[in-house]
Amino acid sequence: MVRIVTEPIDIPMILESLGDPSAGGIDLFVGTTRNHSRGKKVLALEYEAYLPMALNQMQEIADGARKKWDIRNVSIVHRIGRVDIGEASVVIGVSATHRNEAFEACRYCIDTLKKVVPIWKKEFFVDGEAWVGPQGGDQ
Amino acid sequence: MIAVNVKLFAVARDLAGREELTLSLPRESSVSDLVEALVHRYPRLEEWKRYLRCALNHQYISSDQILREGDEVAIIPPVSGG
């Protein structure tokens, strides 16, 4: 399941979508919004997507994970619009027969999403707002 | 000349002050020629120029790809999803 939503991400629904009788485990990554960025206090965040391309890229990531690892199901859901501090902005879930594949595929999905999917984050500070710029290692 | 449609997002859209525009470019222009023309028209994009990527038909394209009449190119500033 690959989706971009404007409402809070329904994590139980994602878990349900991953279920498979042959799976031995589900790995779930929940990315949440931080209250600080580069030493400044962040009040809120807003995400924007180039929707058709973002969905396309997310599907390619999911398909890529299925090709690279022996996994059962994979779901990638990103939220856009305003997201309050501490809420989930992205959820990746992978079910697999064995946990190793689930962990590795999940990490591949979130790492690749952060590099290629056309979604942008704007941070709101006490004294203004700014789009997040080019990022280094810890994204 | 060829006409290329350009879509702008996030910081690129804010700095240019518009979401879409059409650029007239000489035939055989590449993606990097398009970015140069765009920055020439909207100088505030200069500081982001080296970070801009472009997409055609929802796929990233390399900067030396040659553009054709009617192409719709999306300007993708550094992504920050997650």
Image (cartoon, coloured by chain):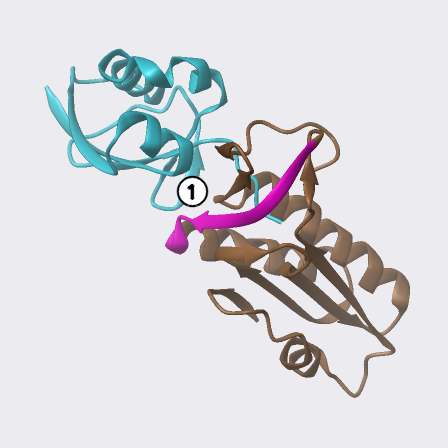
Residue under numbered circle 1: B59
Q: Is residue A78 above or below residue B81?
A: below
Seen from this angle, which residue lies furthest left? B1
Residue A34, position as x, y percentages in the image: 69, 47
Can you give x and y, in whole percent of width and height, for residue B39 in the image?
A: 30, 15
Chain assigned cyan:
B
Q: What stretch is highlighted in magenta?
A: A40-52
**Horizontal and vertical percent position of residue A77:** 58, 64
Looking at the image, residue A126 sits to the left or right of residue B53; the answer is right
Residue plotted at (83% across, 59% down): A103
User: At 26% across and 18% down in the image, what residue appears?
Assistant: B42
Q: The brown chain is which one?
A: A
| SS assignment for the magenta stretch, majority | strand
Q: Residue B4 or A114: which is nearer the viewer?
A: A114
Residue type at mark 1: give it.
Answer: Gln
Tell me the quadrant of the picture where the N terminus of chain B can be found.
Answer: top left
In this view, A118 is above or below A30: above
Q: Mark 1 lies on which chain?
A: B
Q: Is residue B48 magenta?
A: no
